[in-house]
Amino acid sequence: MKVLAYFRSLAARVFRRSQIADDMEAEHRSHIQHRADDLERSGLDRAEAERRAAIEFGGHQRYKEECYEEIRGNFIETLMQDVRFSLRVLRKSPGFTITAVSTLALGIGANAVVFGVLNGMILRPLNVPQAQSLFMIERARGDGNASYPDYLDLRDRNRSFDGLAAYNIDQVGLDTGENPSRVWVLEVTGNYFDVLRLQPYLGRFIHASDEHGPNSAPYVVLTYAYWQNHFQGDRGVVGRTVQLNKHPFTIVGVAPPEFHGTLLFFSPDFFVPIVNQEQMSGVNVLNARGIRSGVFCVLGHLQAGVTPAHAIMDLNSIGSYLEKTYPKDDVHVNFALSRPSLYGNFLGPPVRAFVTGLMLLAGLILLAACANLGSLFAARASDRTREVALRLALGAKRTRILRTLFTEAVLISLAGGALGLWGSVALLRGLSAWEPVPRFPLNLPVTPDANVYGVALVLALVSGILFGMVPVRQVLRVDCYQVVKSGSTGTGRRITVRDLLLVGQIAICAVLVTSSMVALRGLSRSLHSNFGFDPRNVTLMNTDLRMAGYAAGAVPAMQRRMIRAAEALPGVESVGVIDMPPLYGGGHGALIFRDETTDLRPSNAVDTAYKFIISPEYLHAAGTALLAGRAFSWHDDENSPRVAIVNRAFAIKIFGSATNAPGRYFKTRDGARIQVVGIVEDGKYFSLTEDPEVVIFVPLLQSPSSETWLVVRSPRDPRQLATAMKSTMRDLEGGLPAYISTWTKELGFSLFPSRVATISLGVMGVLGAMLSITGIFGMAAYSVSKRLKELGIRIAIGAQPGQVLNAALGRAVKLLAVGSAAGLGLGILASRVLASIVYQATPRDPLVLGGVVLAMLLLGLLATWIPAQRALSLDPLTLLREE
Amino acid sequence: MSSQAQLLPGTLDLLILKAVSLGPLHGYGVLLRIGQISDRALLIDQGALYPALFRLVHRGMLKANWGTSENNRRAKFYELTPLGRKRLREETAGWNRLATAIASALAAQPEEI
């Protein structure tokens, strides 16, 4: 009640200052009048009485100021005093201040960075109007999305959405009259921009009314970034014609600056109508109902008042209609709704799980930092017991002393927070500008915003209060009489709060060290595991022959010419062609039927295999081992029987064993009987964490693909080779945009998730290790300095170095052991989560366990080294004399 | 001057509380009342009274209302709040203890030691 009244009166006075001034003035006047009345009664005339009364009263301005002091002085003045005092105290112990501020800066910085990522990737809604009602439609079973005809049915039959749009991601050759280049486009349905409720920045968008059947809408909408970077923001660009895959397209508009499609991490260059798909990708799946990957993503705004559950029911009723109407093409049509920003359930859950996990770890770091600072503060407070006792004895209030301690804590936390935030903002800016994967316009949209600043501030204040609270009990218990008399507090032998804090902090650090070790080990294993090919010394060149206008029939001949030309380069050992290298995030699925199956509907298929289209030399060039049978030859063409090479997993799954597979047959969706002519080793095809997949390789002469990856094995310097290859290809075909890189570098794409995981966990581990070093060091140094006298006596009466160390540091080492054991156990539990992200991450690995134990031992040794030296080098004579 | 004593620090509040506890008073009245109950032995600067009154109101010991004085003038009258009454009791007890202790200490004779 008192506090409440205090604040009410304070607020009232702050806000009604002039009224108070008037009030005071009136009261002073009234006083003088009353005094004058008395004086008048004693015989003075009125004027003289008033003069005397005013003189007796004194300087009423001064009293007014004194009244103000009563309120202001209690708050802002005291605060300023505390701040000044704390600054002075902190300046006197720079070591403590620097340790505390940098510890906290690390803790807050780590949290701000991770929160920045969380904020950018998960919390921040998409940059489109009413993003909260925007959903994408997925198949519930996760196999593909929708074919274009299915999309049309969904669009026209649903009663839950305000329009449904769809898009594909594709790469096309762009020729603006200068250098031909490859650009990333979104092929969008005509209603795309209208469904997303966007307005063009310049010109106009594509609309549903532009679509009049295949290839009817040769229009381009540029993204703002592409317009700025490649057309220098030229407003005259609208109406210009550019060549896409040698077809003329007209630029009709520019999208708003903040819009780059609905995938957070993907920035395409421009938008083209999906009805012109044939000109883009060379295939036309607009009528192919069976091709479930016909459109990449279907999305739309839910109508007002429609819940996601209702929408799913509505969609599933369309699904059962599709199953009934097209039994050959549509089976198990069940839908789910998800957010389009992380491509629904494909990336959303793992990214969310990972970032949340990281956030937890960062929270642990901050907690460890707070525990660290808490014990530092507690140690400091007990060192200052004398000072506190003295101040108490001189009449200071305990609350006032606590206030100065808190002011100190908050000052440190604010300084640490500011420093950490500064570092993390720089890091986040860097991350946003980073393009992790060459060739893909991927980025991490994690630019810090007000949320990040706010969170950092709150964290700083909360942690300041958290560790400022640790010494409170200590101060409240100080008995100034005892302290001033005896010069020290009784050193209790019981388990103190500080011990618990230290154990907790070491446990947290051990968790971090364990997880980073597990991740590192997993990454190193995945780098050395068998991919089923050998990426070393291989240069890849990617081009798409349809961009140079090659028709399907002319493609294989050209690819053969490219192989021959590359082979002729000096230093080249072997060259092959594949339509899409394994571990490239792609790979086409092919339904596989047994030879005896006659009804080739999808539900009768035995499996879906990844299909790769290769040239005869590919296996050799890629270093894929042939286990049985033969490789392809250039005679496996369209006139000869259909053949395939399968991997071991395929042979075992379909034919029962690897040895009897060559010569046997299987069927594909188009009814062709395909003979297995060779078996190759298993490898990794889609991701490093996948279970063994079934895979078929087919000769490019029998199923041509214009997408061309030249696999060139050569020990030469990749850069020289790239230059040579570029000029050779230019001689072969002038207008062919080509992309050249090494296979090892390209693998970065597949290793990206585990690499990110490892780097972030490694950083967390290092932070944890640093915190535990400072924590143990602080504790050990403190316990030595606290007991200098006792140790001196021990040495004087003949203690051996071992006994001295035991007395000085035994407790610290015991705490370290307990904390490490607890942390190791927790870390092993936590690493189960890791296993889903980092390939082959398992904590049940003697190397990891040994590594963690060793690391913690080293940390302990490092941190106790200096205090131990100090304890051993004590000279009892000097010490006892001084005391 | 010898018949008047300087106030010890902190005792002004106690005196004000005591004065007001005998009935609501305005500022000048408080001054008169203290003079009256201390037989004019205690000297208080007239203006210095007001910061103390202000402080006591601010801390919830007193409450103040404008009214009309016996001289038929407008004046601000102060009254004790329950909190102020409690404080007065405590401070009075504390003061008495201190005064007794000091008095008996000062009254000590050589033969008593």
Image (cartoon, coloured by chain):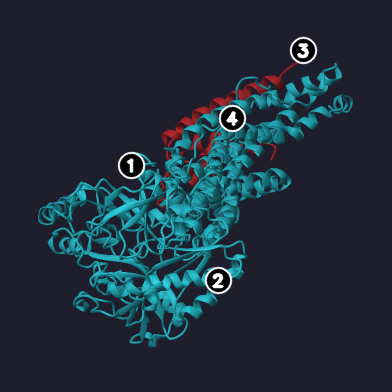
Chain colours: A cyan, B red
Say which label, 1 or 4, has the lower sequence index.
Answer: 1
Say which of marks 4 and 2 sits in front.
2
Say which label, 2 or 1, has the lower sequence index.
Answer: 2
The numbered mark at residue A568 is 2
Q: Determine contact: label 1, label 3, CB under 8 Å.
A: no
Say which of A563 and B72 sits in front. A563
Q: How far apart are labels 3 and 2 at the CA level?
A: 121 Å
Are the residues under badges 4 and 2 in a single subunit?
yes
Q: Chain of mark 4?
A: A
Q: On the picture, is A577 further left or further right than A334?
A: right
SS at circle 2: loop
Inspect the image, locate mark 3, and give the three-letter code of the amino acid beneath it: Ile
Q: Chain of mark 2?
A: A
Q: Position of residue A864 (x, y in %)?
A: 72, 32
Q: How far apart are labels 2 and 1 at the CA level?
A: 40 Å
The numbered mark at residue B113 is 3
The numbered mark at residue A820 is 4
The numbered mark at residue A753 is none
Is residue A20 visible to us here? no
